[in-house]
Image (cartoon, coloured by chain):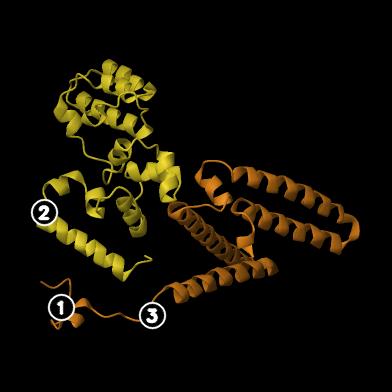
């Protein structure tokens, strides 16, 4: 579906959709805080415009926001997400440990986050790693296999 | 700077200014420039807009210092681009990458993937080895070894075409 949307509009569109869903949740919830949904819609609109404008700039961030990132910029995004996940895992571990120490009942969100990041890491290893050992080069040539560290 | 001969009117990049400052640093380290002179010239180098202005800053520094600087670039992408009178933006568009990526490859701060390295080499009608091998390595490498390195690179490309 995304391919039908012009590249520069893709990320703003996803951002706008997420913001609208968030606003809708506050509206459906009702009660005295219904006005939060209006603030959410306003903030989403401003953020969407900002993201669209950022997508037109000649920077790494602009290229990513405009969905026209080359291999280096994609790598930057990948590393940034890896860093974010690492931080989430460390923060959730600290939160969980603190909750255990003070016998707090508020520790379960940290546990869930920690499990999700850990499971996501294992899932990544399973998806992108190669389980087989592979064939040593020497096995193809008929020469006896030799350890690269032995002389 | 031999690289800049005949194209003094062209605009210098930040990498060119950095290279000139490296030359000035070397001259300062060898006491060919005093501190005040070094600071003045470094300021001039940073303010230079064209290759001619930049060359004037290092004109009286011995050639061995200007030519003997360790190359920061992994290859001769910048030389090839300038020979074809292309801007970084034009080359980036032709290769399908960003201008920033071209800048970083030229200054040796980013090593391109194998497909991109092949695309760059193909664009300039050179082999990957000719394009990206460090100058000192290429100078000391016999032609047969260069051919072997090229063959290995091509073989790797066939094994992992999407790597």
Which chain is indicated by disc 2? B
Name the residue carrying label 3: A131
- Mark positioned earlier in the residue sequence (3 or 1): 3
Same chain for mark 2 and mark 3? The answer is no
Which one is closest to the eye, mark 2 or mark 3? Answer: 2
User: In terms of image quadrants, where is residue B46?
Assistant: top left
Q: Which residue is mark 2?
A: B143
Chain identifier for the yellow-coloured part of the image: B
Tell which of A13 and B30 is nearer to you: A13
Residue A102 picture location, percent across and down: 64, 65
Which one is closest to the eye, mark 1 or mark 2?
2
Seen at 36% across and 49% down, the residue is B110
Residue under pointer 1: A146
The answer to whether residue A112 shows anywhere in this view is yes
Q: Residue at x 50, y 74 (%)?
A: A123
**Residue A103 at least partly seen:** no
Q: How many marks?
A: 3
Chain identifier, orange in the render: A
Asked if B49 appears above or below A61 in the picture, the reply is above
Image coords of residue B49 (percent x, y): 38, 23
Q: Are marks 3 and 1 in contact (CB under 8 Å)?
A: no
- Quadrant where the N terminus of chain B sits is top left
């Amino acid at each position: 579906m995304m391919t039908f949307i012009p590249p520069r509009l893709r990320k703003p569109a996803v951002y706008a959709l997420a913001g609208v869903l968030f606003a809708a949740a506050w509206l459906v919830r009702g009660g005295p805080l219904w006005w939060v949904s209006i603030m959410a819609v306003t903030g989403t609109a401003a953020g969407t415009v900002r993201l669209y404008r950022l997508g037109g700039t000649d920077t790494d961030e602009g290229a990513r926001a405009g969905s026209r990132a080359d291999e280096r910029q994609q790598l930057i995004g990948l590393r940034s997400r890896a860093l974010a996940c690492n931080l989430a895992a460390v923060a959730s571990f600290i939160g969980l440990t603190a909750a255990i120490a003070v016998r707090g009942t508020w520790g379960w969100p940290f546990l869930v986050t920690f499990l999700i990041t850990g499971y996501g890491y294992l899932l990544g290893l399973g998806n992108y790693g190669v389980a087989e050992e592979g064939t040593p080069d020497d096995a193809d040539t008929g020469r006896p296999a030799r350890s690269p560290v032995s002389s | 700077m031999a690289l800049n001969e005949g194209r003094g009117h062209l605009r210098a990049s930040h990498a060119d200014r950095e290279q000139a400052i490296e030359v000035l640093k070397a001259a300062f380290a060898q006491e060919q420039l005093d501190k005040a002179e070094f600071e003045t010239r470094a300021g001039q180098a940073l303010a230079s807009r064209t290759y001619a202005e930049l060359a004037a800053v290092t004109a009286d520094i011995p050639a061995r210092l200007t030519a003997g600087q360790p190359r920061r670039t992994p290859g001769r992408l910048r030389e090839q681009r300038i020979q074809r009178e292309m801007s970084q933006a034009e080359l980036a568009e032709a290769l399908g990458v960003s201008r920033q990526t071209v800048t970083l490859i030229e200054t040796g701060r980013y090593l391109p993937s194998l497909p991109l390295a092949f695309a760059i080499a193909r664009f300039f009608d050179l082999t990957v080895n000719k394009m990206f091998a460090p100058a000192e390595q290429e100078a000391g490498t016999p032609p047969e070894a260069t051919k072997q390195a090229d063959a290995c690179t091509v073989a790797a490309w066939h094994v992992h075409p999407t790597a």
